[in-house]
Image (cartoon, rainbow, N blue to C red):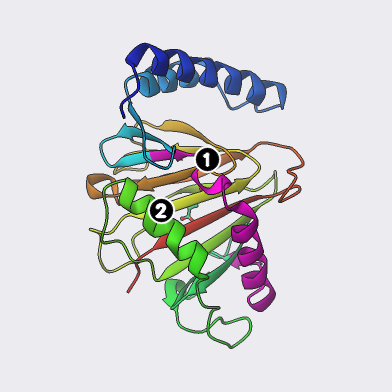
Amino acid sequence: MVRPCTNDYFKLKTHTVVEYLRQKLSGNSEVNVNDCLSNNYFLARSKVTVDLFNDEVIELQHSLTLIKGMAANNVDRYWRSVQEVAQQAPFRKMQTPGGQMMSAEITNCGQVGWYSDRQGYRYTHLDPLTGQTWPTMPTCLKALAVDAATKAGYPKFVPDVCLINRYSTDSKMGLHQDRDERDFTQPIVSVSLGLSANFVFAGSQRNSPRQNILLEHGDVLVWGGQLRKHFHGISKVLPGDDPLTGPYRINLTFRQAL
Ligand SMILES: O=C(O)CCC(=O)C(=O)O
């Protein structure tokens, strides 16, 4: 079902203005009204559909799809699974090849895990911290990623890794490309839980024009196709105390790496 244009426009406009005010009030000095207005314009031009499961599927650009609140439904199961993974493979800070510490804490589940240290960015079969294989990807998390990818037009996506980022409110993630995978025809599926964040989506160059996308609890963002290697990052996590995750934002990034 495609919603009538005027409703979409009104709803998205209201949403954007409310979020702008929320970000301002919570001290996000980086947010500016032009970003919000252009985001609003951009959103107003997006195609919004509501599928059979009542998920709101917003095509922000061709190959960049936001599924609002999709993960909020079974979130207790997802959250339990994240905690079980973290018991076996604890969150830890990783180093960039250049020697800087990343500010988000990271773990993984799946056939491989994404890892970074002075030797470079790569996928490993064993967790260097524990010496064990990475925990198996929980079935419910894999199913969520496959469903989201299918809704976004990638029915063949089978993730073999889920990178889990844990952000406190002073964590960020600089603009980067995901390019350690073998098959760039497969998309990225990114799930947000807990505190909201400003996700920055740029182009094929680091200095390409940027789009700010507010990611809230339960949102799932999928990108692929021509945008698969576009630069992206997290500029700000909004302060708060989330009922599920407390002072953290959790991001689950599913990829087909092998
Ligand atoms: O936290 C996010 O939403 C983005 C994470 C990300 O870009 C990554 O892990 O490569």
Q: Which mark is residue 69?
A: 1
Q: Earlier in the sequence, mark 1 or mark 2?
A: 1
Image coordinates of residue 235 in percent, x first then y, are: 55, 39
Quarter holding the N terminus is: top left
Under tag 1, what secondary structure? Answer: loop
Q: Which residues are magenta?
A: 66-94
- Left or right: residue 119 versus residue 244 is left
Q: Is residue 117 visible?
A: no
Q: Nearer the viewer, residue 140 or 127?
A: 140
In this view of the protein, which residue sits in the foreground, 71 or 120? 71
Q: Which residue is mark 2?
A: 189
Q: How many marks?
A: 2
User: What residue sits 37% from the left and 40% below the top?
Assistant: 52
Type of residue at label 2? Val
Mark 2 Cα shell of 10 Å, populated few (<14), some (14-19), many (≥20): many
**Quick check: 126 above or below 78?**
below
Which residue type does callout 1 highlight?
Gly
**Nearest to viewer (mark 1 / mark 2):** 1
Q: Position of residue 245 (x, y in %)?
A: 71, 51
Residue 191 image position (x, y, % from top left): 50, 50
**Residue 19 in magenta?**
no
Q: Nearer the viewer, residue 176 or 58?
A: 58
